[in-house]
Image (spheres, rainbow, N blue to C red):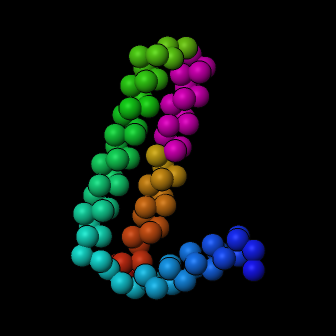
Amino acid sequence: MDSFQMWTTLITSFLEEREGRVTPTEDIRTAVYLVQLVFLFFFVFLFDLLVVKNGPMFYGVLVADVGLVALLLYFLLRRISGYFNF
């Protein structure tokens, strides 16, 4: 078994163990992740406003910022969606 298969097996078994179980700190951890996403968005947005100041590059960084935050928010929502019954 090479190292990639070993890590894949380890991560898969860890995720299978956690499915269906809610830890007591899950809501706090989710809130912290949401605050981090907001800070990330505003940090990159302020950097974009104060440093870049160039038309096409400004919008490129803005689109990258919104895309990154949207992707991370999607991963967060997908992770916590298992704790809700719908």
Residue 30 x/y as whole percent:
32, 62
Q: Is 64 placed left or right of 3 in the picture?
A: left
The residue under the point 51% across, 31% down is 62
Picture quadrant where residue 44 is located: top left
The residue under the point 29% across, 55% down is 32
Q: Main secondary structure of the magenta part?
A: helix
- Quadrant containing the C terminus is bottom left
Residue 76 x/y as whole percent:
43, 61
Residue 57 x/y as whole percent:
59, 21
| Residue segment shown in magenta | 55-68
Q: Nearer the viewer, residue 23 or 64?
A: 23
- Quadrant containing the N terminus is bottom right
Taking the view exactly as shown, the residue that stands out farthest to the right is 2
- Say if 9 sits above or below 51 in the image: below
Q: Nearer the viewer, residue 7 or 12?
A: 7
The residue under the point 44% across, 69% down is 79
The answer to if 3 sits in the magenta stretch is no
Q: Nearer the viewer, residue 58 or 10?
A: 10
